[in-house]
Amino acid sequence: MSISADEFVELMKDSPTNYPMQALQRQADALLIYQSVLQNEIGQAFLALLETFIAPRDERAALQAYGRWFRALADQNLGWQDYLCHEIAQAENPFTRQVQHTNLADLPLALVTAVQQDLRSLQALYHCPPTQLSQWLREISTCPTPPVPWASTITATDLLPSLQQAEDWGTALADLATHYRQQGTGLFARYRALRWQAGQLMGVAYPDPGRLSDLAGHEWQREQLIKNTEFLLAGLPALHVLLYGSRGSGKSSLVKALLQEYGDRGLRLVEVAKTDLADLPAILDRLRQVPQKFILFVDDLSFEEDDDAFKALKVVLEGGLTARPQNIVVYATSNRRHLIREFFADRPRPSAGDEVHSWDTVQEKLSFSDRFGLTLTFEPADQKTYLAIVHHLATRHAICLAPDDLEHRALQWATRHNGRSGRTARQFIDFLKADLTLTQETP
């Protein structure tokens, strides 16, 4: 019997135990655009399980296939329906790539029609609950106990809610298009923090969880960086930024905290090591056509003379024949105001073997940091600033100590460790919180 995707979905809603396994398999096989949804471990295990139900029935093969599918879901603690929505949300295919830049009405009709068909087929799979698969397996199995249906302890109710609530997924293209434009596809949907490594972008599964509200001190610098980042997200001209100052002053933490604040608005942070700066042209080409906004984060920046990385970064900061991408800025941190090391030997001393215009060379070195449109200076923390940071972090971590006692301990810590800085304050609070917790728990 041949039925349409719409009829199949309605059949499952009305009576899930009566719809045919063969029809479910045909819906999966007929995908034209969203094949990637079923191409990873969970999807392949599901298809293999269906095959054991339909082929000449082999009880042992069916039990093993069910076990592989159950374990694949358990490994990620992900429900079957959440898994499907998760994969649809991150899918990278001709539709999801084009709809980020093109209105739905301007896409090829055949592409839009194929996507609608795929979504209805995936909706059919969505409405096939694990309890149904367990029931099918029980019918062909002689096991004394029925197989346990998988049930996740985590439900991603905020993942594509408009799709989950739609009666007909084929009518949800507009909401999907909005999602893809805001959150991206593929790697950029899966990760908000990335790293350029071995000539390619790699996702960072566990980015720094620090938030802007965790940081205290250097309020003016923070506001300037936030304002510049808001320009970037709004599609307005944003400046490259150099964060210069003493060690432990929170420069890197401030940049990384932007991701927690603006990741939902399409901001992505790409860490680029100094040794990989020569790859900057390739990185820009990779990100230029992506609708998300990118901060290329270069930590602890400095150069040696004749460093190729210096030349590559100079082209990005100043621009070249190729137009600068409007969705990319460079945020770099450094402990050195002048990023290129200068030696006394560089100073002009006229002799036959010296460069005639040697001061020009010196000035080029000294002015490289000026090529950043915005330079934010982080001065060393004085005692007042250091204690203000300590009190702020103590409040954030719910540490209850008398102010005088807290300050006395904080100053002792700074004297015995790394001096007064935001980093020292954070290390002190982390140690103090663990110490107080352990003391309270010890009988």
Image (cartoon, rainbow, N blue to C red):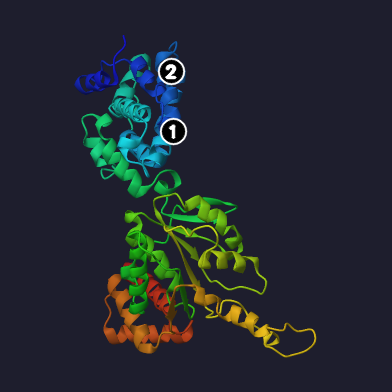
The residue that mark 1 highlights is 36
Residue found 31% across the figure and 34% down from its top: 81
Amino acid on which the number 2 mark rests in the picture: Thr
Asked if labels 2 and 1 touch by Cβ distance under 8 angstroms, the answer is: no
Residue 393, located in which quarter of the rendered image?
A: bottom left
CA gap, disc 1 and disc 2: 22 Å
The front one of 248 and 349 is 349
Residue found 65% across the figure and 80% down from its top: 361
The front one of 46 and 352 is 352
Tag 2's secondary structure?
Answer: helix
Q: In this view, does 155 lie above or below 234?
A: above
Pointer 1: residues within 10 angstroms few (<14), some, or many (20+)? some
Give the label, 1 or 2, closer to the camera: 1
Q: Quadrant of the C terminus?
A: bottom left
Expressed as whole percent of the image width and height from the top left, the position of residue 438 reads 36, 69
Residue 238, located in which quarter of the rendered image?
A: bottom left
Amino acid on which the number 1 mark rests in the picture: Ser
In the rendered image, the residue lying farthest to the top is 1
Expressed as whole percent of the image width and height from the top left, the position of residue 10 reads 22, 21
The front one of 382 and 141 is 382
Residue 311, located in which quarter of the rendered image?
A: bottom right
The front one of 72 and 64 is 72
Visible residue check, residue 416:
yes
Expressed as whole percent of the image width and height from the top left, the position of residue 29 reads 41, 21
First in residue order: circle 1 vs circle 2: 1
Residue found 26% across the figure and 45% down from its top: 158
The residue that mark 2 highlights is 52
Q: In this view, does 9 lie above or below 395?
A: above
